[in-house]
Image (cartoon, rainbow, N blue to C red):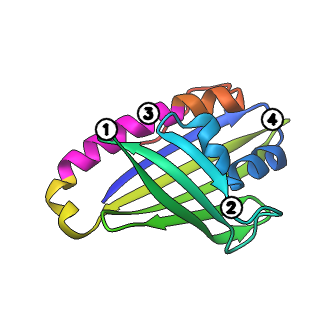
Amino acid sequence: MSRFVINISSPRPAVEVFDYMARFSNAALWDPGVAAATDVDGGDVHVGSRFDLQVRFAGRTLPLRYTVTELEPSGSVVVEAANAFVRSRDRITVRAHGDGSVLRYEALLEPRGLAWVTAPLLAASFRTIGRRAEAGLRAALGAVDETVDR
């Protein structure tokens, strides 16, 4: 299993950052590894909301349907996706900090099926993908520090 964790301070209010992050189709706006994303259900985000992402990986674009599996309106959401090759679980937590907010993003990627054979390669690729996503997320949120925990 590969794990990637980042913490980002933003001058934006926690509720704004949380709403932006909970609508997981916004990943296409900050993650260069996402070629396209759509909000399947529309409306307010709730447990069961679905988001279809086209994810770039190893020279291919793979579809992943993420589903909100946990949601705490106070600032925590979990989205999960799986296909024959991987299972992804992302926990996003946002809390108020001064006039702004702090985002904690924890992504877990687990190879499935025959992909277990490539686990070390998958982990290395995941770190690279995560660093690119982090840079995009910092830009999107107007990050004010470099607080990172890997």
Find numbered disc 3 in the image and state the secondary structure of the residue it sits on.
helix
Which residue is disc 3 drawn over?
131
Q: Residues within 10 Å of mark 2 (few under 14, many from 20)?
A: some
Marked residue nearer the N-terminal end (4 or 2): 4
Q: CA distance from mark 2 to mark 1?
A: 32 Å
**Range of magenta residues:** 120-134
**Residue at (64, 36) in percent of width and height:** 29
For the residue pair 96 and 52, the one nearer the viewer reads as 52
Of marks 2 and 1, the one in the foreground = 1
Marked residue nearer the N-terminal end (3 or 2): 2
Name the quadrant of the N terminus: bottom left
- Image location of residue 86, percent across then percent down: 34, 62
Main SS type for the magenta part?
A: helix
* CB atoms of marks 1 and 4 within 8 Å: no
For the residue pair 24 and 54, the one nearer the viewer reads as 54
| Residue type for callout 4 | Arg
Vertical arrangement, residue 3 with respect to residue 40, above or below = above
**Residue at (31, 38) in percent of width and height:** 59
Which residue is disc 1 drawn over?
59
In this rendering, would 58 be left or right of 98?
left
- Image location of residue 81, percent across then percent down: 48, 65
Q: CA distance from mark 3 to mark 1?
A: 17 Å
Q: Residues within 10 Å of mark 3 (few under 14, many from 20)?
A: some
Which residue is disc 4 drawn over?
12
Marked residue nearer the N-terminal end (3 or 1): 1
- Image location of residue 33, percent across then percent down: 46, 38
| Residue type for callout 1 | Gly
Q: Is residue 25 magenta?
A: no
* CB atoms of marks 3 and 4 within 8 Å: no
- Image location of residue 105, percent across then percent down: 56, 49
